[in-house]
Amino acid sequence: MNDRIPAEAELAWEDFHRLVNMTSDELRTWLLTDASGEEAFPADGPGPGVNELGARVVDILRKRKVDLTESDTELMAEVVDFVEDRLENRPPNAERDEQWRHALMSVGHDPLRPQPSSA
């Protein structure tokens, strides 16, 4: 581990990247689509109103670990808690529950994406 990276940031980074299975470009594109929810395109406003949490996840996905701030570490922990909670409280027929899937995808986790096999 790099001495410049606090232990909590290192752990948050690992957990975050274990659960966030979309790339920054995939998430950005998702957030800008109609499928991501009505709030992505508010009627009153100058432009797309991408949800703040999703936009911050995109920013973190584009960072190197050594460039993380304390705020980034806190956000990664928040995203991990959010995703783990949603996965633990999976609704019946989750694969067909668009609202549940879209909530997870708004922070970069696609629950229908196949998990990478561990070698």
Image: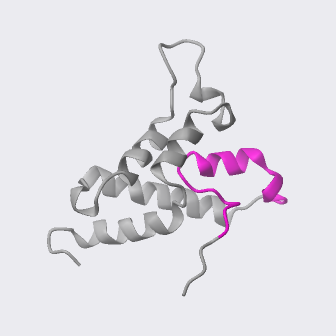
| Magenta-highlighted residues | 92-114
Q: Residue visible at 83% across and 53% down?
A: 96
Q: Is residue 32 left or right of residue 68?
A: right
Please tell me in which quadrant of the rendered image residue 15 appears. bottom left
Where residue 111 appears, as percent x and y from the top left, is: 67, 60
Q: Is residue 91 left or right of residue 9?
A: right
Please tell me in which quadrant of the rendered image residue 110 appears. bottom right
In the current view of this chain or complex, which residue is farthest to the bottom?
119
In reply to whether residue 15 is colored magenta, the answer given is: no
Where residue 63 appears, as percent x and y from the top left, is: 31, 53
How many numbered discs, if any? 0
Q: Residue visible at 28% across and 59% down?
A: 64
In the foreground, 108 or 90: 108
Where residue 107 appears, as percent x and y from the top left, is: 53, 49
Q: Residue visible at 67% across and 45% down?
A: 102
Q: Is residue 104 left or right of residue 48?
A: right
Scheme by which the image is coloured: one colour
Q: Residue visible at 24% across and 53% down?
A: 69
Quadrant placement of the C terminus:
bottom right
Quadrant placement of the N terminus:
bottom left
In reply to whether residue 107 is colored magenta, the answer given is: yes
Where residue 76 appears, as percent x and y from the top left, is: 40, 57
